[in-house]
Amino acid sequence: MASVQPSPGPDSAPCAFCDIVAARLPRRVRFEDADLLAFHNRLSWAPVMLLIVPKAHMTQRAFWESNIFPRVARLAVQLGEAECPGGYRILSNIGDDALQTQTHGHLHVIGGIALGLYVSRRLAVLPPDFPYRDPDQ
């Protein structure tokens, strides 16, 4: 595939992920090729928190619909297996209700610890016989 260049965010607003792609912000790279960058998230809610981003700025929807997304999915599985042998979660936050904070399309690979439920108990209505019990509750 041809190399793609980082571009500014919407309306030429600054984009942290574009700056990370261009190495204008610090980064700990886990994988890089002409189209994709995988790096350690600066957040540390779990022992392993990786982000996979396209080097070209695009929205979450455009990222998921892009022709590079099958490669992203394979890379996410490869990194998850290598970094989190006990299990991992692959996810994207799309839209305000999902708490998406970056406009630049991206995928999270999270693991290295038991991750618990997908949704806070305040939001989830669980049946009394639900088999999983959060150890922190």
Image (cartoon, rainbow, N blue to C red):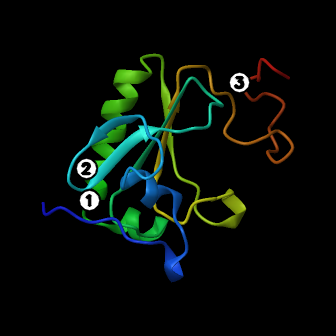
Image disc number at residue 131: 3
Q: Amino acid at mark 2?
A: Arg
Identify the residue shown where x is 71% and y is 24%. Answer: 132
N-terminal of the pair, mark 2 or mark 3, is 2
Which x, y percent locates residue 27? Answer: 44, 40
Image disc number at residue 56: none
Secondary structure at badge 3 equals: loop
Pointer 1 with pointer 2, Cβ within 8 A: yes
Which x, y percent locates residue 31? Answer: 30, 38
Identify the residue shown where x is 51% and y is 64%. Answer: 15
Splitting the image into 4 quarters, where does residue 128 fall?
Answer: top right
Secondary structure at badge 2 equals: helix
For the residue pair 117 and 77, the one nearer the viewer reads as 77
Q: How crowded is the residue under tag 1: few (<14 C-alpha within 10 Å), some, or many (20+)?
A: some
The residue identified by callout 2 is 71
Q: Amino acid at mark 3?
A: Pro
Image disc number at residue 68: 1
Quarter the C terminus occupies: top right
Which x, y percent locates residue 130? Answer: 75, 29
Identify the residue shown where x is 40% and y is 62%. Answer: 64
- In the displayed structure, 53 sits above or below 30; it is below
Outermost residue toward the left in this view: 1
Q: How crowded is the residue under tag 2: few (<14 C-alpha within 10 Å), some, or many (20+)?
A: few
For the residue pair 3 and 78, the one nearer the viewer reads as 3
